[in-house]
Image: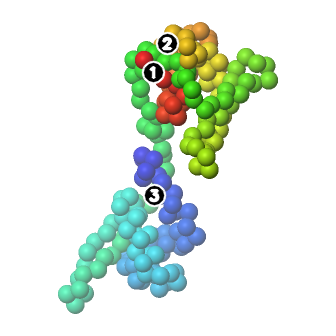
Amino acid sequence: MDFKTAAILGTYISKGYAEDFFKLLVNYHDLSASEAASRLGLHIQTAQDFLDAMASLGILEKIEVYEKKRPYYRYSLNRQHIQMDIDLTKIEEKRSAGDLGRLIREKTNVSVNFVLSRDGKTISLVVVWSGIGRDRKEHRLSLTKSQGIFLYNLPFPNAEFLSIAEVMEKADIGTDLAPEILDIVELLTKHGVIEEN
C-alpha cells in the first residue's frame, strides 16, 4: 500500500462511525448510502463519501442499480480483512552516487548563524533569516549529529569548493549517512546558505 492510499484509509477508518459502518456492511448483503445514513444517523453525503472512499480502495464493491429509471449505487464488502502495510522504502528520495560529487561551500553575505554545540566541535542549529524589515522571517533548523559535524567542516565562503563526499570524508561521516547529509545540503542550498560550483 502506498502512503497516499494509507492516508485515505487512515482518515476514514479513524472516524467515530467507521466501526458501525463496517458492522452494517458485514451484516447486510449490500447497502445504499441512504440506507446506511438512516441507520447510523448520519447525513447522506457523509455516508456517500465514506462508502465511495472504501470502494476506491477496493474494500467495497460499488454497483449501479436502477429503481424506477433512477440510478443509484449499492455497496457490498469485497473482503473480510483490511490490512494497512506501508513500505516506507518507497517514499525515500532516490539519489545517485553522483550527488556526492557536487562541489559546495558556504555562500558569502548570507543572513545566517551557525550555532556551535557545547563541545564546540559541531554545529547544533542553523538560523537563517529571509526577507527585510517587518517581513523578515527566522528559520531555525535543528540538525542531527552527523549534519552538525558535516556543516562544521563545510568550506568557508572564501575557501575552495569541496565535493560533498570530500566534506563527509573530512568530517569522518560514513556513506550510510549520505541521505541525511544530502537532505541538509538541499535545504541550505534552497535557503541560499550553500552555493554550488
Q: Residue at x 45, y 58 (%)?
A: 8
Q: Position of residue 84 (x, y in %)?
A: 49, 50
Q: Position of residue 140 (x, y in %)?
A: 65, 38
Secondary structure of residue under mark 3: helix
The residue wearing badge 2 is 161
Please say whether residue 64 is visible from this viewpoint: yes
Tell me the quadrant of the picture where the C terminus can be found: top left
Q: Quadrant of residue 122?
A: top right
In screen coordinates, is 142 left or right of 44? right
The residue wearing badge 1 is 196
Q: Identify the mark nearer the N-term, 2 or 3.
A: 3
Picture layout, residue 72 above or below residue 131: below
State if disc 3 and disc 2 touch (CB < 8 Å).
Answer: no
From mark 2 to mark 3, how far is it between C-alphas?
Answer: 45 Å
Residue nearer the viewer, 116 or 64:
116
State if disc 1 and disc 2 touch (CB < 8 Å).
Answer: yes
Q: Identify the mark nearer the N-term, 3 or 1.
A: 3
Q: Residue at x 22, y 90 (%)?
A: 68
The residue wearing badge 3 is 8
From mark 3 to mark 1, how far is it between C-alphas?
Answer: 40 Å
Picture layout, residue 62 above or below residue 42: above
Q: Residues within 10 Å of mark 3 (few under 14, many from 20)?
A: some
Q: Which three-letter amino acid code belongs to the residue tagged 3?
A: Ile
From mark 2 to mark 1, how far is it between C-alphas?
Answer: 8 Å
Q: Residues within 10 Å of mark 1 (few under 14, many from 20)?
A: few
Secondary structure of residue under mark 2: loop
Q: Residue furthest front?
A: 133
Residue nearer the viewer, 25 or 144:
144
